[in-house]
Image (cartoon, grey):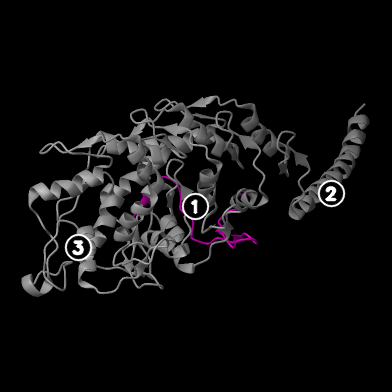
Amino acid sequence: MLLLPVALITVMPCSLDQHGARSQRSQEADKRHRRKGEKTYSCDECGKDFTQAGHLKRHQLIHSGVKPYNCDLCGKSFTEAGSLKKHQLIHSGVKPYSCELCGKSFTQLIHSGVKPYSCKLCGKSFTQAGGLKTHQLIHSGVKPYSCDMCGKSFTEAGSLKKHQLIHSGFKPYSCEFCGKSFTQAGDLKKHQLIHSGVKPYSCDLCGKSFTVAQNLKTHQLIHSGVKPYSCKLCGKSFTQAGHLKTHQLIHSGVKPYSCELCGKSFTEAGSLKKHQLIHSGVKAYSCELCGKSFTQAGGLKTHQLIHSGVKAYSCDLCGKSFTEAGHLKTHQLIHSGVKAYSCDLCGKSFTQAGSLKTHQLIHSGVKPYGCKLCGKSFTQAGSLKTHQLIHSGVKPYSCDFHTGIDVSCCDQCGKLFATDAQLQQHMFSHTEERPYKSDLCEKTFKAPHQLKKHQQIHTRK
């Protein structure tokens, strides 16, 4: 009786050895598969591959939409307990990882700066292989996640979710300084850098500073001169794909964002928000030199270029200089002679759509801007402001020779004018040249406005 167990015992090690040997061979085979990077487990929903069944199961929770782990403080949900723990560090305020170079602290460990995974198409580098794969979806052009509200497509489900917050209108994160609200906490943090005034990222070429490193990278594309994204309809090129998309909305003619106060429509929600600041009357940004106020910081910066006197953009044809590149482009349309925008009522043509709209106000007869002093009305607010200078008695344009003030003036007689336009018109009186000739008769004129006035005689006949 005692021999049987012994026999069994003597057999068992042999059996275990054989089983153990097979197990080892199996493990070695699995290791070889893993070393080769073989991914035998595929997701039926999106086709993503995994080396282990467990990783596939974890991934499938994303598609299920089930998020059983909720944050007690903000209500945000997660598919995994580990993700919830990471998230809760944000609320704790504990930031155990500090940067030795700048002292900035973080809730999670910061990488060494080594980015071994590079994109073969654009050269962008990443710290993880997963980051590179996500990025490569951009180049593939595949965007399987679409918004039901507006049809916009995305390469990732997470990007779609972020986008959908825009349509919800829910913005729980507000700025303590200016009251601006955001859908995400990260966007609020980025915004608050504006108020801090700290701009640690500077451009080596022009000295312009930025609050975020990515904004500096985007800016540097301007200096490179590379504009790989071109519009098929008009040929205009852009440094970024996003700018091209925004531009293409102009050609579509679709303007889904309308102002409730004046009915003006816009292609983008951001443009509508900027416009609404006009109606609010709030102009928080003031010029220290002249006191003029603006609704946006960008408007103030553009204005301050006037005081600097720097006009870096010059026209090759006539030498006229401008403070902004956009103004130069607008001016160059005059030399091209192309006037693509015509008035249906009188046939007058314009180089820009905005100029046509301004002109059409004349035919409408609507003059909503009235002078409080004399009652005279105008179609545009700018015309009213120009008119009000007459009542103020201020004539800021004087001769350098007579007054010593470094401003625009009449070089010939020192006469003072309320506006620069009046000064330019006056300058025609000092020249003997008459380059503007009537097509209907031989009469010539010094100024274009004189020729236009003359042509009215021919049209009345």
Q: Which residue is mark 1?
A: 340
Q: Which residue is mark 2?
A: 25
Name the residue located 51 percent from the left edge and 45 percent from the top edge: 250
Question: Mark 1 and mark 3: span between their CA atoms?
Answer: 30 Å
Name the residue located 61 percent from the left edge and 53 percent from the top edge: 232
Specify the amino acid type for callout 3.
Answer: Leu
Using a 10 Å C-alpha cutoff, classify the residue at mark 1 as few (fewer than 14 neighbours), some (14 to 19) or many (20 or more): few
The reply to whether discs 3 and 2 touch (Cβ–Cβ < 8 Å) is no
Specify the amino acid type for callout 1.
Answer: Ala
Q: Secondary structure at mark 3?
A: helix
Question: Mark 3 and mark 2: span between their CA atoms?
Answer: 94 Å
Identify which residue, 184 or 56, lies in the foreground: 184
- Residue 287 coordinates in the image, percent (x, y): 18, 53
Instruction: Please give left or right for residue 280 compared with residue 265 in the image.
Output: left
Q: Quadrant of the N terminus?
A: top right
- Residue 84 coordinates in the image, percent (x, y): 49, 33
- Residue 239 coordinates in the image, percent (x, y): 51, 59
The boundaries of the magenta stretch are 104-130
Q: Is residue 94 visible?
A: no
Q: Nearer the viewer, mark 1 or mark 2?
A: 1
Name the residue located 92 percent from the left edge and 35 percent from the top edge: 7
Instruction: Please give left or right for residue 347 compared with residue 67 in the image.
Output: left
